[in-house]
Amino acid sequence: MTDFPKNAEQARTDRDVTREELTETLDALGRKLDVKTRVNDNLDAKVDQASAKISEKVSEPAAEKFRQGTEVVRANPLPIFAGALALLVTIRLIMRKRSSS
């Protein structure tokens, strides 16, 4: 631990450094706790990866359709994910019903 400031100028400098460090820490915590932004960043990265892979495998018109679809997902991710979740739940229920029969 550092020594107690010996004069007012050292105390001000120490205070300013502490404020900067605290601001940086709070900004970092804010970024970590901003789930929506983190999800959107992750979604963008995954969509870009998928788009690149699709472009390599299919014809240009099909790749363009996929890119248009990715823009729709980026603009409205919540309804798309809600639909996908509903589809997964439905499939799970159907599989469970078939396995119990």
Image (cartoon, rainbow, N blue to C red):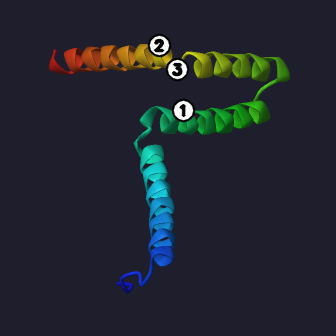
User: Horizontal and vertical percent for residue 44?
Assistant: 61, 34
Task: Indicate the amino acid at tag 3.
Answer: Pro
Which residue shows up at 32% across the image and 13% down it? 90
| Residue ID for mark 1 | 40
Q: Quick check: marks 1 and 3 in contact, CB under 8 Å?
A: yes
Which residue shows up at 23% across the image and 16% down it? 98
Task: Indicate the amino acid at tag 1.
Answer: Asn
What count of labels does the image hold? 3
| Residue ID for mark 3 | 77
Task: Indicate the amino acid at tag 2.
Answer: Pro
Q: Quick check: marks 3 and 2 in contact, CB under 8 Å?
A: yes
- Which of the marked residues, 1 or 3, is nearer the chain's N terminus? 1
| Disc 2 element | helix
Q: Nearer the viewer, mark 2 or mark 1?
A: 1
- Residues at marks 3 and 2, CA–CA distance in whole angstroms: 6 Å
How many residues crowd mark 3 within 10 Å: few (<14), some (14–19), many (20+)?
some
